[in-house]
Amino acid sequence: MRFTDDARDYYENLPNIDKDRLQIIVELFDECVPNASAEIHYPNILSLMVDGKGAIGVSPRKQYLSIYVASIESLKIFKENLAELGKVNHGVGCLRFRKMEHINLDTLRIIFTKIGKADHIGLYGFS
């Protein structure tokens, strides 16, 4: 995965507990998505991109890991697979996981693979 300088600096300077949680997501995204890259959006959201277009944002919070939907295409894919994703608290465009063990990584792999094949033309949330 290609990181912008700001994204690399943010990621490398996270506290170990936060970096460990994000690393699982970043590595899985990179495994499933050709031409994956990462940028920083807002001070603490790592935006994971497909062919330079925003797909999702991830952010380690004190009590949970947040995944933000960044495109209409990603929103559709997450909604289609939400029931199998695991123990999740969700809002309109945000998924929150209290523990990494609550995420069904097999389902997340399917989601990321579909996201990698989608054309992210419609932005949702931040851009």
Image (spheres, grey):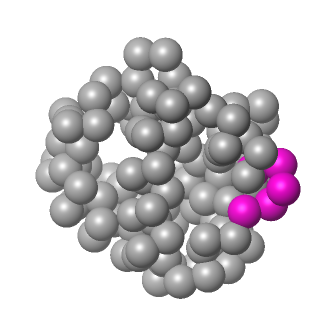
Depth check, front residue: 45 or 70:
45
Q: Is residue 111 above or below residue 83?
A: below
Residue 8 coordinates in the image, percent (x, y): 73, 52
Q: Quadrant of the N terminus?
A: bottom right
> Can the viewer see residue 54 in this picture?
no
Magenta region includes residue 76: no
> Can the viewer see residue 36 in this picture?
yes
Label tally: 0
Residue 45 coordinates in the image, percent (x, y): 66, 39
Magenta region includes residue 6: yes
Q: Is residue 17 above or below residue 101?
A: above
User: In which quadrant of the rendered view does residue 76 lie?
Assistant: bottom left
Depth check, front residue: 27 or 41:
27
User: In which quadrant of the rendered view does residue 103 lie?
Assistant: top left
Residue 122 coordinates in the image, percent (x, y): 66, 65
User: In which quadrant of the rendered view does residue 4 lie?
Assistant: bottom right
Depth check, front residue: 99 or 76:
99
Q: Is residue 107 above or below residue 19?
A: below
Residue visible at 67% across and 44% down?
A: 12
Q: Main secondary structure of the magenta part?
A: helix
Looking at the rendering, the stretch of residues picked out in magenta corresponds to 3-7
In the visual, does 51 lie left or right of 34? right
Q: Is residue 4 above or below residue 17?
A: below
Residue 60 coordinates in the image, percent (x, y): 52, 31
In the visual, does 4 lie left or right of 113? right
